[in-house]
Structures are given as C-alpha cells and as structure tokens.
Image: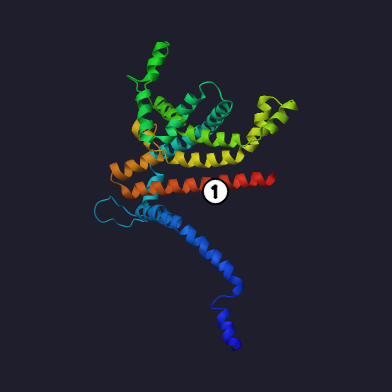
C-alpha cells in the first residue's frame, strides 16, 4: 500500500487528532437540537415577528403598511404608556424585595417545623401550583368592596373599608398583595431547599461563638443564600414585567389607569383598540428593558463575587 493510500485511509477529510473534538461537538449540538428547535419556534420566531409588526401600522385586519419607527415615536408622547411604565417599575421595586423577604421568613419558619406547618405550607404554596386566573379570581373575591372578606373583617373591627375597585391607591394595594401571595411559593420552595443544604454544624459553631439569631442570619445564612437570591431576583423582575392575568382579572388596569402595566396596556392596544403595530412596539420595549435589567444585574452579581 502506498503512502498516499495510507494517508487517505487515515484522514478522510478530518485529521485523526481532531476526530474526538468534532465528535464531541456534533454530540453536543445533537443533544441541544430539541431545545434549540423549541427556542426558535416559540421564542425567536415570535420575537422577530413582533419586531416586524412593530414597524407597521397593522390592525390585525387587511394589509399593513411599513411605518418605520412611527410607533416608537408615538410611544414617547403617550402619557398612558409612561403611566404604565411607572406602575410597572414601582411594582417591581416594591414587590420583589418584599417577596424575597417574605419567602425567606416563611422558609425559616417551615425549617423549624412550627405547629401547623403543613397548613402554613399549603396556604403559601397553593398559588404556585394553580392557575394565575384562579388566584386572581380569589383575590378579586377577597378584596371585593361589597361582599369581600377583607371589608367584612375591617367592618367587624370598626375600621374603615377601602373602595378596592374604585379608588386607585386601594386597587394598587390589592394587586400588590395578591401578587405577593402568588409569587411567594417559588421563593419559599427555593429558599427552603437552600436552607436544608446548610450544614447545621456551621450554625451551631456560630452560636457557640456567641452569635445571636440575627447575627447568624446576617453573617452565615444570608451570604449562603446569595445565589438563590440572585436567581429569584432575576426571575421575579422578569415576572413583574410579564404580570397580566392578576391585573386583568382584578382591575383591567383601572381605575383611571392606576393599575395599568406595560403588558396590560400592550394587550389593550393590540387587541381591544386594534392597534397591533403599537401593541407590538410596547412588547418589544418590555423585552429590551427586561433583557437589559437582567444583564446589568448579572454583571453586578459577577462583580460582587469577584471582589469576594
């Protein structure tokens, strides 16, 4: 056999030393293929479609015309859009830290096996496993200003009853409270799992060194919770910008836009007002804001870890 024949037999297009790397590369992408296909079909393709529609005057009926950035310029002069943006940002600033604190507090209580812990667990985990519409309907019934449980309790205690459906501040408070209840389940589950991974010997050593309960929480438990807190913060910020069912069922963005969020406003413009292009533009803005917030928070977290 000649040298040329030997070379052709051992290197059919790829050097022998590169074969394992190519095989690993091919295997990796083959395993990723189903997820990549789903991502492309259900995320990337709709996103590209939304960007395309946002550049038109589409109403969902008939032929749409290309209008460039006209929808985005109209957004800058739209007071309702800016009100919805303020409401969404305020909801994120208020609800995310409170949800984290509430989830950690409940997880700490459940970890100590308090009496009635099973019922306590069911109350806070139920919203996580049932439909958001059901949670919103329950919240609407609880805060109904005519027959709601909250008003009955307040009346029995001789306290004033807010107009949950007609007063803007009261409506916003009711939405925040229901949202806290709805999202606390995820925080409880993840924090409880993280707490169970902490070696009790570490906590006992800190106690023997004279650390109080608060000092153990601040100096031992909380630093170990940072990865979980980071993940929950990112997820909750994203969820806040995607809140729709609770607000739409409870208030539909009212009264007078006091509970209007970017997602509900985009839905109203795109479907109720038949301004599909404008609604898509709002959706694209929401996506960009969430992506930017996630990247900035991730970089801040990485910088904090590098400093340590």
Asked where in the image residue 39 lies, by quadrant, the reply is: bottom left
Compare residues 239 and 91 and report the one nearer the observer.
Answer: 239
Compare residues 42 and 169 and report the one nearer the observer.
Answer: 42
Which residue position is annotated with label 1? 295
Looking at the picture, does residue 63 appear above or below residue 261? below
Compare residues 215 and 3 and report the one nearer the observer.
Answer: 3
90 vs 17, left or right, is left
- The x, y position of residue 244, in whole percent, is 38, 38
- The x, y position of residue 154, in whole percent, is 41, 15
In which quadrant will I find the N terminus?
A: bottom right
- The x, y position of residue 297, in whole percent, is 56, 44
SS at mark 1 in the image: helix
Compare residues 112 and 134 and report the one nearer the observer.
Answer: 112
- The x, y position of residue 84, in whole percent, is 41, 38
Residue at 50% over, 21% down: 116
Residue at 38% over, 34% down: 246
290 vs 143, left or right, is right
Farthest-out residue, left? 62
Asked where in the image residue 152 lies, by quadrant, the reply is: top left
Q: Is residue 104 visible?
A: yes
Residue at 49% over, 48% down: 291
In this rendering, the count of numbered labels is 1
Q: Residues within 10 Å of mark 1 (few under 14, many from 20)?
A: few
Q: Is residue 143 visible?
A: no
Farthest-out residue, right? 209
Give the colour scheme shown: rainbow
Farthest-out residue, bottom? 2
Looking at the picture, does residue 76 appear above or below residue 16? above
In which quadrant will I find the C terminus?
A: top right
């Amino acid at each position: 056999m000649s040298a040329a024949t030997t070379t052709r037999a051992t290197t059919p297009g790829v050097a022998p030393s590169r074969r394992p790397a190519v095989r690993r590369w091919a295997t990796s992408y083959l395993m990723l293929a189903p997820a990549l296909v789903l991502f492309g079909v259900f995320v990337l393709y709709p996103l590209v479609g939304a960007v395309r529609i946002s550049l038109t005057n589409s109403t969902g009926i008939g032929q749409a015309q290309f209008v460039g950035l006209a929808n985005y310029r109209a957004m800058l002069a739209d007071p309702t859009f800016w009100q919805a943006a303020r409401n969404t940002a305020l909801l994120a600033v208020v609800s995310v830290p409170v949800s984290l604190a509430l989830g950690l507090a409940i997880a700490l209580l459940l970890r100590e096996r308090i009496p009635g812990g099973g019922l306590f667990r069911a109350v806070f985990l139920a919203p996580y496993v049932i439909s958001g519409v059901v949670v919103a309907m329950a919240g609407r019934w609880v805060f109904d200003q005519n027959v709601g449980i909250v008003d009955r309790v307040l009346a029995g205690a001789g306290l004033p009853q807010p107009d949950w459906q007609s007063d803007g501040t009261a409506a916003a408070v009711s939405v925040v409270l229901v949202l806290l209840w709805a999202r606390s389940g995820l925080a409880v589950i993840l924090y409880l799992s993280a707490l169970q991974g902490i070696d009790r010997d570490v906590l006992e050593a800190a106690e023997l060194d004279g650390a109080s309960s608060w000092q153990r929480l601040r100096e031992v438990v909380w630093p170990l919770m940072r990865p979980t807190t980071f993940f929950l913060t990112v997820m909750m910020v994203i969820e806040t910008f995607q809140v729709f069912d609770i607000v739409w069922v409870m208030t539909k963005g009212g009264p007078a836009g006091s509970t209007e969020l970017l997602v509900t406003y985009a839905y109203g413009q795109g479907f109720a007002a038949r301004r599909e292009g404008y609604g898509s533009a709002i959706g694209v803005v929401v996506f960009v804001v969430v992506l930017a917030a996630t990247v900035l928070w991730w970089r801040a977290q990485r910088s904090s870890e590098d400093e340590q």
